[in-house]
Image (spheres, grey):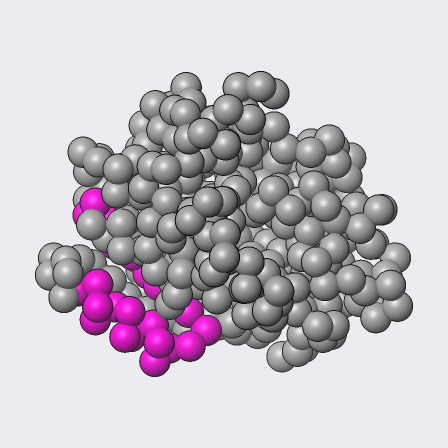
Amino acid sequence: MLHFFQRTMFGLKGPSGFSRFSTAEEVTQGIDGSGLTAIVTGASSGLGTETARVLALRGVHVVMAVRNTSAGREVKEAILKQIPSAKLNTMELDLSSLASVNNFASDFKSSGLPLNLLINNAGILGTPYMLSKDNIELQFATNHVGHFHLTNLLLETMKKTALESRKEGRIVNVSSRRHQLSYSEGIRFDNINTQSGYNALSAYGQSKLANVLHSNELSRRLKEDEDEAPITANAVHPGAIPTNIFRHHTFFGGLTNVFGKLVLKTVQQGAATTCYVALHPQVEGMSGKYFGDCNLEEASKEANDRELGKKLWDFTTHLINENFTN
């Protein structure tokens, strides 16, 4: 615990050789990602943009999955100006809509592209109570259900790619330390979509807890898979970054302006752990883990609850089947 505190507060390097001050470019320095294809959700802003840029810089063919396609095209052009050799595509994806997830997965599979890396990055934070198009609480729908469904739809493509290329596939779920601060019951299975008792930040914590539980349960299922395709699934905490994810909370936005340099990371630092877990050889074979500051960390007791992970998997599957409307 002391080492974790020292690493976090003073930026000391951990066992990986990196710290909270390391940038995505630094942690991927010298890594050749050519021949790999990645999907990065939420790639039109913030951490998603930097993740896409750095993966492209390392030679990865990046499919930018974005809700706002015009913003996505602008980001693509900006990256190409900086990295003319970058391989980039933009595709529309609204994670709060199961129909959009279905369409994206269908279009991607029709493209014939392989898939080595799936970076489930997109997210929203602290929204007022709202339901998605499929009548699912919006933060849970966007941050967890959409990514859960996307991952399941693309898993066979990832397995095929891993077996044919003999390269490890990696699934990275961007979670948050806020997963430790969900509702008192952890996941509100009985009241997931009800407004009564809704708390914007607890709902965010719930969705981030779901991200870690999803990673862990997926990792267990992959290890038991008869196909034996080399695919890992891990969760990461990027750190607190002053991106537009704070747009629904002016209080936190104000704090970022006052204390930003003291406690917050830059976007370049925030994308480091995602890029590290996606590309670094140190992470090879590691699955069902939780990373922060490019080092292994301990997730909460609830996040490591195997029975809770199984229950969430079945619950989410039922939720998709029950609420999906074409």
Residue at (37, 37) in percent of width and height: 21
Residue at (72, 46) in percent of width and height: 181
Using the image as rendered, state which of residue 26 and residue 94 is in the foreground: 26
287 up-or-down from 142: above or below: above
Q: Quadrant of the C terminus?
A: bottom right
| Res. 317 visible in picture | no
Using the image as rendered, state which of residue 118 and residue 265 is in the foreground: 265
Residue 114, how many percent across, how many down?
32, 51
Q: Bounds of the magenta span? A: 58-80
Is residue 72 rendered to the left or right of residue 153? left
Q: Is residue 64 magenta?
A: yes
| Res. 8 visible in picture | yes
Is residue 209 rendered to the left or right of residue 76? right
Residue at (18, 33) in percent of width and height: 30
Q: Quadrant of the N terminus?
A: top right
Q: Is residue 16 magenta?
A: no
236 up-or-down from 281: above or below: below
Residue 257, how many percent across, how many down?
47, 60
Q: Residue furthest left?
A: 84
Using the image as rendered, state which of residue 192 and residue 36 is in the foreground: 192
Which quadrant would residue 147 be assigned to in this image? bottom right
Which quadrant would residue 149 be assigned to in this image? bottom right
Is residue 111 rendered to the left or right of residue 83? right
Residue 270, how many percent across, how many down?
41, 47
Total numbered labels: 0
